[in-house]
Amino acid sequence: MVDLILRSSIQDFQKKVINWEKESGISYPWRTTPNHWHALVAEIMLQRTRAEQMLTPYIEFTERFDTPEAFLQGSTDNIFDSLGLKWREQTLRELANSLAGRNIPDTRPELLKLPGVGDYVASAYLSAHVKKREFIIDSNVVRLYGRYWGFETNPETRRKKWLSELASELTPQKEFVEYNYGLIDFTKAVCKIRPKHHQCPVKNNCNFAQRLS
């Protein structure tokens, strides 16, 4: 797949996603927090939850629990009820126990040993908060890549090795944070299940958009 894509096409796609993020991306408090505990908690809380729904619980959490130790010693007082997934609290307590008295790892293998941390959370945390170049893949990103580059997708596509290779190739060496946030925000705002083609900056070179025109 990667060999079939021209380098100029990749650079054009990267530039447009990054520029869209700079102009239209959404600023959330967990994206700029210097507290890595809060950042990791946010990435776990975001799983299967809309960012807007998570905003208030996240703020309440960070105001009370500045460290894993503070979380273990305190009470959440139903912070997580509004998320509709009560199991998150138990996962975060297991995470806090594993991090108490130590720094959060800054490598993928060590992060993946932590409770609640899978491939996506590890990539998102390392990219956004440790500033290490990592590619991200979720169902929305798979949809965008499939539409733009013109390949069929299914629920198993995100687990394919060739897709990981493609995602890695598409992630720029610089401005990868902006690019990854651009993928997240753009697929939620524009390249949705029912895409908003009139707002799409990449439609002129998108296989899916061209087939509909």
Image: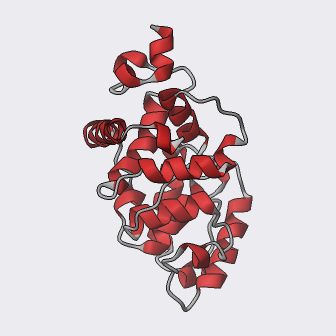
Q: Position of residue 195 (x, y in %)?
A: 49, 21
- The residue located at (70%, 34%) in the rendering is 154
Q: Would you identify the image quadrant in which residue 210 lies?
A: top left
Q: Position of residue 99 (x, y in %)?
A: 59, 83
Between 68 and 161, the one nearer to me in the picture:
161
Residue 18 versus residue 80 in the image, above or below: above
Is residue 94 visible to the viewer in this orientation of the structure? yes
Q: Position of residue 125 (x, y in %)?
A: 48, 64
The image quadrant of residue 146 is top right
Picture residue at 48% right of the left edge, 43% below the top: 3
Above or below — where is 40 with respect to 52? Answer: below
Q: Residue furthest top?
A: 213
Q: Is residue 60 visible?
A: no
Compare residues 185 and 34 and report the one nearer the observer: 185
Total marks in image: 0
Please give left or right for residue 178 compared with residue 88 in the image. Answer: left
| Residue 196 as seen in the image, left or right of residue 174 | right
Q: Nearer the viewer, residue 127 or 73?
A: 127
Please report the residue visible at 38 percent of the width from the left and 24 percent of the height from the top. 205
**In the depicted structure, whether residue 100 falls above or below residue 13:** below
Outermost residue toward the front in this view: 3
Q: Residue at x 46, y 76 (%)?
A: 66
138 or 49: nearer the viewer? 138
How far from the left and from the top, in percent, is residue 185?
43, 40
Quadrant in the picture for the N terminus: top right
| Picture colour scheme | secondary structure
**Which quarter of the rendering shows the C terminus?**
top left
Indicate the quadrant where residue 117 lies.
bottom right
